[in-house]
Image (cartoon, rainbow, N blue to C red):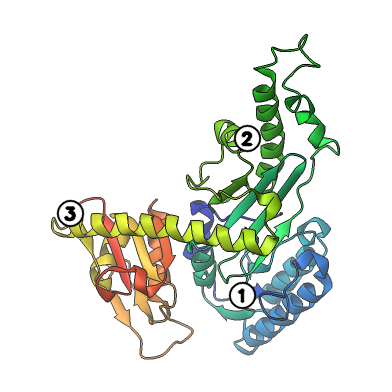
């Protein structure tokens, strides 16, 4: 899919970056999120949006008397990215580009982010953090004899099918002798054993193609397989986010819309169970001084590297600053010197090896906008 999954090291680099000529651009195709095509289908439009946004940013920096050589470095870096054909041959739905005179970082995302840009002394990594830590995205693998389909379920409720490459044209023939219970193939394997071996081989071939597309992703995978292939695929599976619950109906009888709907139902139940467990743990730990739903306490804990798991409201917009000791200073309105407080806390948690989840407000305990469990009491 040519999707880039930011690592903790990536977030550390982006959020610790400081330079007065820093430009951040998020690019998405035009149109509603349900109708957007992958950027690779019309890269010229995305390239134009990127050039336009960077050009506007460079103009703002020029007005702020940033040296011309710094502006040239920014423009040259973007030109090189535009000329990189491999980068633009992608099924990504949006791009995040961070550029300064010190260099350029770009990420291809499966999320439908809105197009916007900004300049300042740091990169605006907030939307990237939210997009990659919001759990309402995933995959559905529909698997039957001779038919394999992989769907991407996006956080905005849209979905699309991904082409699996590298599968043999005669994939279905791998199960041919399974239909005759080995009666035509007894010299190669016992008739009772051969079908099981073939189903495992078949599923292994499929999994290789699936992993080429999704390996490195942190999104869950829902399996919709025929009754004979479902146990075989789970037996050979190595993808750590395969959901225990699957879609029980034979996928051959389901349309893509039906698969997407049933897949989301599975993901929602799985996600709700995980959050319920976390909220219960949160209550227990808070009673022992190892959890909080107060921003100021969490900011200090995050700065000290004590946050284990952080949940914050996906729609949180409060801005301000947080100093090197974790002291929070809210701002009445955004400015070039402020940033999203929840985003900054999330960045500090990621830099110190913690887990971050952007969630809907209703998923947080006690009506809070942010909550965290700590590795140790203060």
Q: Earlier in the sequence, mark 1 or mark 2?
A: 1
Q: Position of residue 164 (x, y in %)?
A: 75, 48
Q: Which mark is residue 377?
A: 3
Mark 2 nearby-residue class (10 Å; few <14, some 14–19, many ≥20): few
Q: Earlier in the sequence, mark 3 or mark 1?
A: 1
The reply to whether the C-beta atoms of the residues labelled 1 and 2 are less than 8 Å apart is no
Cα distance between the residues tagged 3 and 2: 50 Å
For residue 315, what is the image quadrant?
Answer: bottom left
| Residue that label 1 marks | 23
Looking at the figure, which quarter contains the C terminus?
bottom left
Mark 3 nearby-residue class (10 Å; few <14, some 14–19, many ≥20): few
Q: Earlier in the sequence, mark 3 or mark 2?
A: 2
Q: Secondary structure at mark 2?
A: loop
Is residue 205 or residue 326 the one in the foreground? 205
Cα distance between the residues tagged 1 and 2: 53 Å
In the rendered view, tell whether residue 33 sits above or below residue 377: below
On the picture, is 314 further left or further right than 98?
left
Q: Which mark is residue 327?
A: none
Mark 3 vs mark 2: give the one in front: 2
For residue 84, what is the image quadrant?
Answer: bottom right
Q: Position of residue 304 (x, y in %)?
A: 28, 57
Q: Residue furthest left?
A: 288
Q: At x 63% / y 62%, what residue is drawn?
A: 258
Mark 3 vs mark 1: give the one in front: 3
| Residue that label 2 marks | 228
Q: Position of residue 13 (x, y in %)?
A: 52, 58
Q: Secondary structure at mark 3?
A: loop
Is residue 305 or residue 136 the one in the foreground? 136
Q: Position of residue 83 (x, y in %)?
A: 83, 64
The reply to whether the C-beta atoms of the residues labelled 3 and 1 are less than 8 Å apart is no
Cα distance between the residues tagged 3 and 1: 39 Å
């Amino acid at each position: 899919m040519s999707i880039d999954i930011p690592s903790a090291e990536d977030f550390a680099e982006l959020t610790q970056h400081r330079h007065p000529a820093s430009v951040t651009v998020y690019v998405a195709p035009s149109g509603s999120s349900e109708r957007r095509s992958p950027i690779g289908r019309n890269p010229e439009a995305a390239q134009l949006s990127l050039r336009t946004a960077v050009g506007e940013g460079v103009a703002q920096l020029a007005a702020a008397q940033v040296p011309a050589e710094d502006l040239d470095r920014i423009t040259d870096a973007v030109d090189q990215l535009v000329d990189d054909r491999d980068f633009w041959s992608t099924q990504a739905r949006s791009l995040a580009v961070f550029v300064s005179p010190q260099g350029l970082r770009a990420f291809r995302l499966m999320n439908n982010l809105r197009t916007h840009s900004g300049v300042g002394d740091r990169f605006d990594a907030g939307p990237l953090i939210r997009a990659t830590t919001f759990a309402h995205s995933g995959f559905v693998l529909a698997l039957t004899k001779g038919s394999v389909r992989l769907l991407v379920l996006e956080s905005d409720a849209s979905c699309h099918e991904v082409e699996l490459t590298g599968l043999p044209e005669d994939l279905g023939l791998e199960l041919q002798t399974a239909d005759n219970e080995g009666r035509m193939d007894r010299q190669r394997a016992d008739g009772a054993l051969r079908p099981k071996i073939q189903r495992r081989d078949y599923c292994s071939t499929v999994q290789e193609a699936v992993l080429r597309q999704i390996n490195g992703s942190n999104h869950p995978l829902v399996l919709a397989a025929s009754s004979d292939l479902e146990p075989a695929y789970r037996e050979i599976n190595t993808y750590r986010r395969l959901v225990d619950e699957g879609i029980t109906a034979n996928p051959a009888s389901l349309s893509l819309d039906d698969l997407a709907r049933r897949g989301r139902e599975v993901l929602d139940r799985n996600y709700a169970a995980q959050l319920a467990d976390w909220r219960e743990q949160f209550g227990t730990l808070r009673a022992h001084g190892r959890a909080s739903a107060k921003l100021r306490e969490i900011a200090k804990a995050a700065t000290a590297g004590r946050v284990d798991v952080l949940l914050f409201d996906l729609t949180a917009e409060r801005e301000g600053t947080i100093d090197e000791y974790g002291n929070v200073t809210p701002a009445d309105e955004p400015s070039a010197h402020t940033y999203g407080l929840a985003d900054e806390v999330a960045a500090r948690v990621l830099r110190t090896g913690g887990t971050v989840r952007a969630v809907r407000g209703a998923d947080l305990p006690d009506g809070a906008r942010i909550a965290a469990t700590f590795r140790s009491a203060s």
